[in-house]
């Protein structure tokens, strides 16, 4: 272990690394139960381009159980009641949330920065919760094979946090997953995504829509006065697209979505375009003594269905349900961490299998051929028609706050 000049040493019951949806919600849930918690976020604020902004009914139900849903919905947001795709021939509804038995039969389109600010503000109302921004975790503290906390850089030097439990909630490029030498099972989805924004006009559809044409897929997500646009490309096709130039990208977008012709010139430089290499993976074992991974740190999700934020939050709820009492007793055993993975691994595997099916059976044929999109035959069967909506909106198994 490297020796550093440590500015200070702090102790807490639970040190959470990563201030995304999983980490923020877990900090709030534990703080409400009197558990001492420290949330470390590497960035100095929560504002990122092109984070997931979709809060599904499953999460809104959790917010309602915490008494926060009404205030959350007072923040500026949009509602997506259906997932529809427009083809040159027709408009097809892939998922209709209005039929679901929930108080929130829609996807809430809320900028993730606003959601995280809201949740962490709630968490910090509890004196036993501390949120540290600009805390760049670099090392795990290991003693006798047990993780005892972390060391991070920020705020004038090196700092040490000692904890009964350390939780890695630091996303798809998790530093804790790397430091803990966790083994992952990876799949390679047949696509990547370019993200950019264009102005949205007030009279245009609320929520969003997808556009499918031979060889092309575009998704448009409502961000108030802007469209957040996902331009889906075949895996490995980014360099070829860059070589063709920005003008070719703009022409292609307008061919698929003609109504954007009057604003496509707002896209003037490749710096306005973010490239997302679509990945999907699952850590074989989510825990080591004293350390637990949740959210994208434990299972990187494809953007299909926009479920990543919701599964991360469900991970946080199950983690709090299982570990609050052990943390209150200042003693977390390995079997407690095993319980978290046992409850969350199966639904994660099922939704990843569903995403893979959509990617291979729907997206890949569109991207790699000149065939137009043909809706799967099972969408016409009443018994199966609501399945995508239920899976996307509510998850595989319901998760409730039990503490």
Image (cartoon, grey):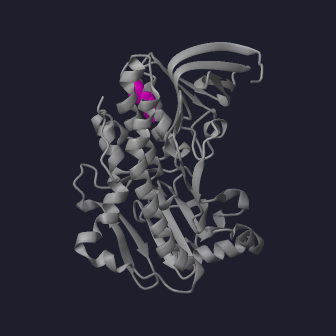
In the image, residue 394 sits, relative to residue 132, either above or below, namely below
Residue at 42%, 29% (x, y): give it. 28
What residue lies at 59% left-to-right and 14% top-to-bottom?
Answer: 10
Q: Is residue 31 above or below residue 258?
A: above
Residue at the image position 58 percent from the left and 69 percent from the top: 190
Q: Nearer the viewer, residue 332 or 380?
A: 332
Q: Residue furthest front?
A: 144
Quarter-wise, where is residue 166 in the image? top right
Residue positioned 74% across, 72% down in the render: 240
In the rendered image, residue 82, in percent from the top left (x then y), is placed at 34, 64
> Left or right: where does residue 365 sit relative to residue 96?
right
- In this image, 99 relative to 286: left or right? left
Q: Where is the C terminus found, in terms of image quarters?
A: top left
Q: Is residue 389 above or below residue 371?
A: above
Magenta stretch in the rendered image: 25-30
Q: Can residue 119 be seen here?
A: no
Q: Is residue 396 left or right of residue 305?
A: left
Residue 151 visible, this angle: yes
In the rendered image, residue 392, in percent from the top left (x then y), is placed at: 37, 58
Residue 353 location (% of width, % of height): 45, 62
Number of labelled discs?
A: 0
On screen, 297 above or below 186? Answer: above
Q: Quadrant of the N terminus?
A: top right
Which of 167 and 146 lies nearest the eye of the viewer? 146
369 within the magenta span:
no
Residue 27 inside the magenta-drawn segment: yes
């Amino acid at each position: 272990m490297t020796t550093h000049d440590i500015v200070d040493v702090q102790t807490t019951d639970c040190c959470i690394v990563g201030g995304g949806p999983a980490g923020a919600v877990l900090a709030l849930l534990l703080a409400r139960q009197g558990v001492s918690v420290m949330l470390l976020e590497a960035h100095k604020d929560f504002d990122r381009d092109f984070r997931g902004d979709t809060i599904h009914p499953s999460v809104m139900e959790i917010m309602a159980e915490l008494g926060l849903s009404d205030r959350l919905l007072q923040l500026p947001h949009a509602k997506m009641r259906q997932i529809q795709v427009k083809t040159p021939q027709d408009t097809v509804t892939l998922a209709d949330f209005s039929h679901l038995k929930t108080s929130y039969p829609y996807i809430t389109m809320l900028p993730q920065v606003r959601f995280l600010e809201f949740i962490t503000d709630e968490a910090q109302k509890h004196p036993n919760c501390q949120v540290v921004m600009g805390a760049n975790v670099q090392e795990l503290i290991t003693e006798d094979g047990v993780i005892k906390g972390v060391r991070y850089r920020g705020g004038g030097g090196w700092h040490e946090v000692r904890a009964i439990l350390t939780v890695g909630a630091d996303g798809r490029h998790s530093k804790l997953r790397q430091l803990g030498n966790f083994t992952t099972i990876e799949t390679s989805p047949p696509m990547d995504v370019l993200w950019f924004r264009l102005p949205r006009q007030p009279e245009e559809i609320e929520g969003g829509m997808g556009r499918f044409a031979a060889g092309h897929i575009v998704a448009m997500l409502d961000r108030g006065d802007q469209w957040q646009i996902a331009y889906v490309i075949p895996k490995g096709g980014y360099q070829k697209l860059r070589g063709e130039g920005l003008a070719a990208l703009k022409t292609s977008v307008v061919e698929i979505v003609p109504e954007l012709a009057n604003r496509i010139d707002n896209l003037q430089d490749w710096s306005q375009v973010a490239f997302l290499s679509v990945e999907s993976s699952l850590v074989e074992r989510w825990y080591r003594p004293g350390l637990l991974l949740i959210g994208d740190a434990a299972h990187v999700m494809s953007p299909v269905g926009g479920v990543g934020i919701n599964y991360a939050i469900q991970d946080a709820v199950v983690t709090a349900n299982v570990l609050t009492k052990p943390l209150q007793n200042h003693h977390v055993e390995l079997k407690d961490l095993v319980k978290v993975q046992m409850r969350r691994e199966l639904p994660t595997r099922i939704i990843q299998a569903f995403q893979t099916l959509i990617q291979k059976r729907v997206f890949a044929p569109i991207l790699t051929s000149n065939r137009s999109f043909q809706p799967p035959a099972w969408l016409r069967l009443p018994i199966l028609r609501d399945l995508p909506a239920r899976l996307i909106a509510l998850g595989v198994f319901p998760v409730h706050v039990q503490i």
